[in-house]
Image: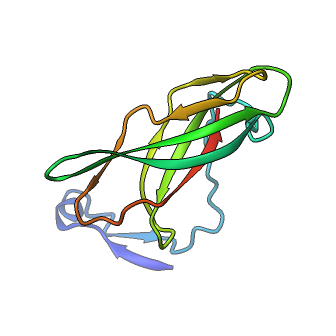
Amino acid sequence: MRVATLPVAVARAFPQKLRATVPRTVTHLQVTSRTWSVAPVSSTRSLVAVLEAGPIEGQHFEYGTDWDAYARLKPTTSRDADVRLFFRFLSADSVQVATCESDQLRVEPEVILKATCSSPAVLVNGMPRPVLVEAEVRR
């Protein structure tokens, strides 16, 4: 046990309580929390396959360059799938240099869909150029 002294102002107001005993351990404390908006997590990997993905170099500015990404998607089931894509731009050293996300997409079984970023990623001059894009399917 550790003994802590109360502040001087409190000690003067309550002279009978000059000391307080404070436990140093917290082993018997309980933590509670509330959860809300709980929804089951569903996998989108089995609904849509990424056939191909890559970077698209855009407009050059004096401070940097716009980069976009594309991916070709094919459904793996016989029904429509609503998904989004998360693109990671990787340098030659496999370092992530930027990200972007697509709009909501409806992938239909009859069509191979080409998707791009909803807005381009801006890479400031001096940053490594992306040479590879990884596309992750999300809901």
| x then y, percent, for residue 47 | 78, 33
Q: Nearer the viewer, residue 40 or 132?
A: 132
Q: Residue at x 45, y 79 (%)?
A: 2
Residue 12 lies in quadrant: bottom left
Which residue is the extreme one toward the left?
62
Q: Is residue 24 left or right of residue 80?
A: left
| x then y, percent, for residue 92 | 47, 70
Picture mark count? 0
- Coloring scheme used: rainbow
Q: Is residue 115 left or right of residue 44?
A: left
Q: Quadrant of the C terminus?
A: top right
Q: Nearer the viewer, residue 21 or 123?
A: 123
Q: Is residue 132 above or below residue 39?
A: below
| x then y, percent, for residue 10 | 23, 60
Q: Nearer the viewer, residue 88 or 22?
A: 88
Q: Is residue 26 left or right of residue 80?
A: left
Q: Is residue 119 left or right of residue 61?
A: right
Q: Is residue 52 above or below residue 126?
A: above
Which residue is the extreme one toward the right?
78
Q: Residue at x 58, y 47 (%)?
A: 53
| x then y, percent, for residue 49 | 74, 40
Q: Residue at x 52, y 40 (%)?
A: 70
